[in-house]
Structure formats: structure tokens, C-alpha cells
Amino acid sequence: MQENETAGGGTLELISFEIAGQEFCIDIRAVREIRGWTAATPLPHTPRYILGVINLRGAIMPVLDLRDRLDLGHTEASSRHVIMVVQDGERIAGLLVDAVQDTFVVDEALMQPPPAVESSTGETFVDAILPREGGLLSRLVVANLLPVDTRVAA
């Protein structure tokens, strides 16, 4: 993730969301739009966390169950769920989340590195943790969440 540097320097604009009762955030610049749940068309031979694909104004886009991707269980999607459309370079995907919470600006000096723990998959999904009143907020790395071979032409 890159910082959103202003004249004062060192601020980040983040968007927070909920998955399985836990709050996470990502850099708001990675979010193209937020939309209501749309059923995805399943694709054969894809990882379990890929629910399928949807048509986003003429572009075919995969939809990922972010709860499943983070190994927090599987989402039984309903109309109360939200798809955050995110982009990393040419890659675009929808992330199914339980709810979008808030957008906010925070001083990057408040972000702390996550503890060094071994991952069973070797993938790093959390790059920083923000201590907040009532708990901790983990910032996710959008680039690492998306499947490597997901490419959509602009």
C-alpha cells in the first residue's frame, strides 16, 4: 500500500468494513465503487474463495468471498452484503464483505507493523495495524488479496 501524502505529509485515507464480526480497512484509492450484492456466475476449477464472475458495465469481474479468502469461514451471501469493487493496476475484482463501515483519514505514524508470524499459505494479507478505541483495525494489502491471473481490460 502506498501512503496518501499531503502538504503536511503522512496521512492515509482508509475505508473500513466488517467481515465475520471483525473490522478491517484498505486504502480508499484502491476502491472504485461500492455496490449491493449481485449473484455471481460460478466458474469451474477456481479456488473456493472465488464466488464467480459478474458483469460490471461490460467488464467481466471476479467476485471474492473475502471472509473465505482470509480463512474466517464462508459467507452465505444475501441482500445485506456489499461488494467493494477494488483495483490494483490492471486487476479488478469485487470483494464480498458483510458491511462497509466508514471512511477516515489517519496519521500514518499511528499505523504499526503486524507481528511477525508464520503464514500457512506464505501470503501476507495484513501490512499494518491501527490501534483504535475498542480494538485494533488491520489494514489489508489489496494486491495480495486478488488472484494473480485476474486481468480485466479497461
Image (tube, helix red, strand yellow):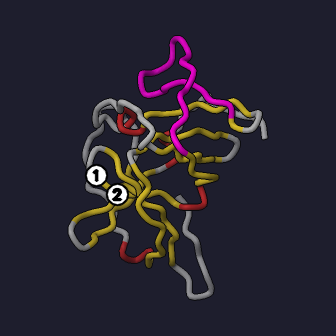
Give me the residue at 48% from left, 27% from top.
50
Rendered location of residue 12, percent (x, y): 50, 71
Is label 2 in contact with label 1 (beta carbons under 8 Å)?
yes
Q: Residues within 10 Å of mark 2 (few under 14, many from 20)?
A: many
- In space, the residues marked 2 and 1 are separated at their CA atoms by 9 Å
Which residue bears the numbered disc 1?
22
Rendered location of residue 17, percent (x, y): 40, 55
Badge 2 or badge 1: first in the primary sequence: 1
Q: Vertical placement of 135 versus 86: above or below? A: below
The amino acid type found where label 2 is placed reads Ser
- Magenta range is 36-55
The amino acid type found where label 1 is placed reads Gln
Residue 25 visible in rendering: yes
Q: Nearer the viewer, mark 2 or mark 1?
A: 1
Q: Was residue 38 drawn as part of the magenta stretch in this picture? A: yes
Which residue bears the numbered disc 2?
138
To which quarter of the image does residue 57 belong?
top right
